[in-house]
Amino acid sequence: MPRVTTPLGPDDPRRLGEYHLRARLGAGGMGTVYLAHDADDRRVAIKLIRPELAADPAFRARFRSEVRRARQVPPFCTAAVLDADPEHPTPYLVVEYVEGASLEEMVRRDGPLRGGALHSVAIGVATALAAIHSAGVIHRDLKPANVLLSLGTPKVIDFGIARAAEAPTEHTRPDQMVGTIAYMAPERFATGAGRRPPEPAMDVFAWGVLVAFAATGRTPFAADSPVATAARILTQPPDLDGLGGPIRELVAATLDKDPDQRPSAHELLSRLLAAGAADQAGAVDPQLQWAALAMRNNAGAATARAEEAEQAWAWVARRRRRRQFLRRAATLTALTALLLGLATAGSVALDWRTGPRAADPLARITIADSLRGPGVWLAKEQSGPVGGCEFEWAGLLVERSTSAGFRCQGPDRPLADPIVAVSVFVPEEGDCAAVWLRAGVEGAYRVSLCHDHVALTFEDPDPTRSAVISSAPAVVPAGYSEVSRVRLTIVARDRYIDADIGGRPSLRAEIPGRILRAGRLALGVVPDDTRSGGSTGPDVADASGMAHFMNLQVWEP
């Protein structure tokens, strides 16, 4: 069901930065939300702040701070933050546009959820909370209206910024509280010395109320008035009639009056995954399952994600400046327009060569795995006479036990133009860490990071027809040693494949002839076939070797 929009009014802007506004999606105490299109004609949602709030320096400072945090929220079951301009005369925030009805609309229209549908909502919203909390953000207004069901997959919207940037007193008007009071934790009603600062436990309480509503069509503290509802939240146990099994126990735990007794979002997610494995096997969409496992496995990687988010947004700023320059230049002369037209013919190459493309938040993250244990990439460890995949040293260790290579297959889904980023320990002489792209029955492309070079190879099912497409010296950043970890980023776009090491362009290759269009991903180890033995390195036939990987992320444009 498409989201309801209303036409733009005479006072609504038609353009913000590079975004063309098309319609209104809604309005609230903080501002108006618009449906817009970006420069590539993709739909986005823009929240434009009210002018009177923008005029308050303290508000603008809070908005700027919260934007920085919101940018760091991994886009797992959340509407990804794509852009923002806190310095605009009326600041605005750009987020992923999610097509679909809200959970509130679905329950009111179709009735309470059951079985796999309920478990999917519970695990999806818990995944979103884990992602939000991992970036130091608190939602503060989690409710069914803020959960959109896109193709059945829950996406949480309106987090962080909406409540963190309230009026300077941080007091909400009574008419603003009525709509969300049923989802407010008891500590939120405290005043004076007993008032606690906003904390993640408040969102966990709201999760319990939300899941109870999804399962029964009513909230567990519902009463005849907002005041009576608040009183029940403060003094009465929740009414969980209609809930059963493990989900009832989890909801009850999250509705504890004492915030210190509630599980964290990550603990909640782990318990949901365990309950799903026992009682709901196969009921959750694979994409949702990957997102949940990724957040569980990446619980300790918030710092790395924050650093990557900062790099991503620095790249976005460069991208915006380049586009603004091109727009201004296009108005100068017809000759300039002609030149820009010629440049556009190579725009695909230009876009992915001005990267790092992997940091582009307009791409959709498909896989994220810390590679610290079974879950997203591998369901279980593997071992055999020719090699193995096991989790050691807080990462995935791949070993080969013969003179051939060994690889650990990723999830069973084909990807055409993936963007792969993974941390790799630079192999010792004789070995190469390898990433396979578009692997299938017709072959695969393999990017190999070796001791002193990086190579792109086409692997044919018939090894005699395999061939190196391109090779280049490995540009390892200064200060790294032979056993140091570097970030390897691979960008596949049609017949072009890039490899960057530590953010530095290292390999630029064009695939000749017919290309493989899509296939699976894999991580592994191969012998360095440029070595021929002798005193400079081990023999290529050396029958053992290893590679180590950590913190894998895969995007799809």
Image: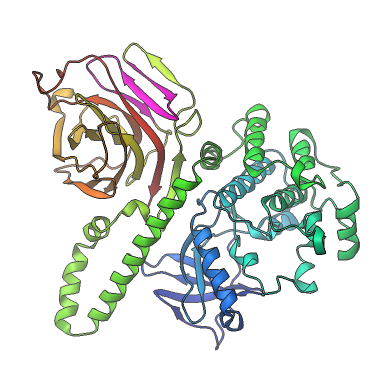
Residue 6 visible to the viewer:
no
* Residue in front for this viewpoint, 59 or 345: 59
Residue 50 is left or right of residue 541, and the answer is right
Residue 509 is left or right of residue 104, and the answer is left
Residue 540 visible to the viewer:
yes
Magenta segment includes 418: no
Task: Find the residue positioned furthest to the top.
Answer: 385
Report which quarter residue 546 is drawn in. top left
Q: Which residues are magenta?
A: 387-409
Q: Position of residue 430 (x, y in %)?
A: 19, 24
Task: Find the residue positioned furthest to the bottom.
Answer: 10
13 is higher (above) or lower (below) than 555: below
Residue 24 is left or right of residue 360, and the answer is right
Residue 244 is left or right of residue 5, and the answer is right
Question: How does the figure colour the protein chain or chains?
Answer: rainbow
Q: Main secondary structure of the magenta part?
A: strand
Report which quarter residue 146 is drawn in. bottom right
Magenta segment includes 391: yes
255 is higher (above) or lower (below) than 316: above
Q: Position of residue 106 (x, y in %)?
A: 69, 55
Report which quarter residue 33 is drawn in. bottom right
* Residue in front for this viewpoint, 539 or 518: 539
Q: Position of residue 442 (x, y in %)?
A: 25, 31
Residue at 49% in and 73% down: 86
Residue at 56% in and 48% down: 134
223 is higher (above) or lower (below) than 334: above
* Residue in front for this viewpoint, 444 or 272: 272
